[in-house]
Amino acid sequence: MRPTLRLLIVAATLCAAAPATASDTQYWQTLNVGVALPDNFKVSNETVLRSSDVKGFYEIENNFMVGKKVNKFVTLWLGYTFDPQYSHGNFTRREHRFRQQVNFDSFAAAGKVKFSGRLRLEERWREGLAGTGWRLRPQVKAALPIAGKVMLTLSNELFIDLNNSSFQTVDGLERMRNAVFVTVPVTKKVSIDFGYLNQHGFVPNGRDTSDNVLTAGLSASF
């Protein structure tokens, strides 16, 4: 079976299976800007707006990161996340995160399919709540050109809690995100993407959650 067909079958399975266990429908919009600097340094800023049927508008997540490309495949990143949270548009609390991250770009290939990965460590603080939450977020992606420079991408990301705090109470695997999306170049430096993401939450001694998310993004690289 050709790699293109395999990826399309997996994508269709993800989209078809999720609604049976869905607990919420969400809508995420992303703006990502990256700038290349001398000596293989780069900076990026990602802003994510999130809303849902259950919670209304509930989050603005802004991630600023500085990276250093150390070789063809590996980039090291440090960053800070400012994350005000809301309930139906009403402010509730702010979260702050410090990030350390290693990206592995196109580290393997199978035909036209290219694989990349990321390992992210986060320290999290919430204003008004005690403690620091330590969390690991490994991610793997498979990308395939489907028409010229239009790309189909599948990704899997795990959220693994490394400790407990007043707001981080799950031991180990807390969440999993599976996504499928299409990226379309608009110009040489600008692209748009749209797709579907399923966010599965593991709830100790309770019923797991499974959110269906429609995603749209605009990315620019300079």
Image: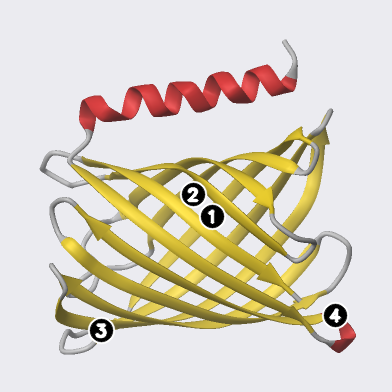
Which sits earlier in the primary sequence, circle 2 or circle 1?
Answer: 1
Relative to residue 137, is residue 213 drawn left or right? left
Among all residues in the image, which is located at the extreme front?
186
Q: How dense is the environment of label 2, judged by Cα within 10 Å: few (below 14), some, or many (20 and up)?
A: some
Please give the residue where the numbered disc 1 appears in the rendered image: 138
Which quarter of the rendering shows the C terminus?
bottom right
* SS assignment at label 4: helix
Which residue is rendered at x = 19% and y = 85% of the image?
130
> Identity of the amino acid at label 1?
Pro
Which sits earlier in the primary sequence, circle 1 or circle 4?
Answer: 4
What x and y, as percent, mark residue 207? 13, 39
Disc 3 to disc 1, how far (Cα)?
A: 24 Å
> Identity of the amino acid at label 2?
Glu
Q: Which mark is residue 94?
A: 3
Please give the residue where the numbered disc 2 appears in the rendered image: 157
Which sits earlier in the primary sequence, circle 3 or circle 1?
Answer: 3
Disc 2 to disc 1, how far (Cα)?
A: 6 Å
Please give the residue where the numbered disc 4 appears in the rendered image: 40
> Identity of the amino acid at label 3?
Arg
Relative to residue 157, is residue 88 drawn left or right? left
Q: How dense is the environment of label 1, judged by Cα within 10 Å: few (below 14), some, or many (20 and up)?
A: some
Determine whether label 2 and label 1 are within 8 Å by CB: yes
Pick the front one: 198 or 133: 198
Which residue is rendered at x = 66% and y = 48% of the image?
184
Mark 3 or mark 2: which is in front? 3
Relative to residue 175, is residue 138 drawn left or right? right
Q: How dense is the environment of label 3, judged by Cα within 10 Å: few (below 14), some, or many (20 and up)?
A: some
Which sits earlier in the primary sequence, circle 2 or circle 4?
Answer: 4
What x and y, as percent, mark residue 215? 43, 50
